[in-house]
Amino acid sequence: MVVIGAGENAEIAYEYFTHDSPRAVVGFAVEEAFLSTEHDRLYDLPVVPLERVVHYFPPGNHDAFVAISSTKLNRVRMRLYAKVKEAGYSCASYVSSRAFVWHNVTIGENTFVFEHNVLQHHVSVGDDVVLWSGNHVGHRTSIRDHCFVSSHVVISGYCEIGESSFLGVNACLADGTKVGHDCIIGAGAVVVRDTEPRGVYVGNPARATGRDALQAFKVDT
């Protein structure tokens, strides 16, 4: 498989796929504007231009994984995920051997589940999602595509997390809560009622700040 990216998240993806999965990483790809002749190798593997990645690692023989953080409210990861799919790649997902994932959980493509996550009965996780370490995702909860869930977040049962949302460290969501798409839930926020799309919520109980989430993450609109 080829990892898309060459920063910290790409190094993490390399380490976890290499040491805790049956997959072999054979190279990295970045957009040509970010390619440097001084840094054309990582872990002694080639770093190639994303625009020509299919010539180095043909999609018929390789899967891809887009290893990008929550930059611009997940938009960078989302864009590159769409780009590699258009190029014909299937995208791998990683689930830590130290995560608890019940047998009827569903997990999409290009999703990364770190250690000590708990995914309970009939949880659904979409495509291109990051679940950092130590989260609890309660039964029947749905996490939509392109979300980023930071560490030690508690999502209770029957919740819905809207597409491209960001949940900060130690956030807590009550049973049945619906988080609108493109929301930011701040670190330590306690969400006890549904949130509006593109809102920024902080505090206990969580309240809207009035800020626009896309502006907060410097997303061009």
Image (tube, rainbow, N blue to C red):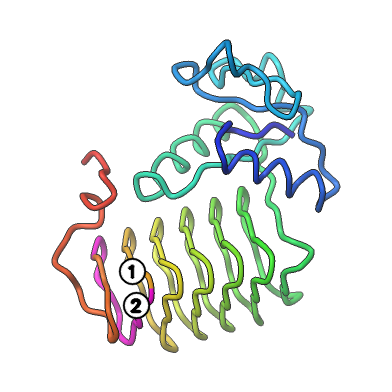
Q: Answer yes or no: do the residues labelled 1 and 2 have beta carbons within 8 Å?
A: yes
Residue 113, given in percent of the width and then of the height, sits at: 64, 60
Q: Left of 70 or right of it: where is 134?
A: right
Residue at mark 1 to residue at mark 2: CA–CA distance? 5 Å
* Residue 116 part of the magenta-drawn span: no
Identify the amino acid type marked 1. Gly
Residue 45, given in percent of the width and then of the height, sits at: 74, 24
| Crowd band around label 2 with a 10 angstrom C-alpha radius: few (<14), some (14–19), many (20+) | many
Where does label 1 land, which residue? 186
Q: How many marks?
A: 2
Q: Left of 153 or right of it: where is 106?
A: right
Quadrant containing the N terminus in the rendered view: top right
The structure residue drawn at horizontal position 73% and vertical position 61%, both measured from the top left corner, is 96
What main secondary structure does the magenta stretch of the protein show? loop
The structure residue drawn at horizontal position 58% and vertical position 69%, both measured from the top left corner, is 124
Q: In front: 59, or 156?
A: 156
Residue 194, given in percent of the width and then of the height, sits at: 30, 80
Residue at the limit of the structure toward the left, as seen here: 210
Identify the amino acid type marked 2. Ala
Where does label 2 land, which residue? 189
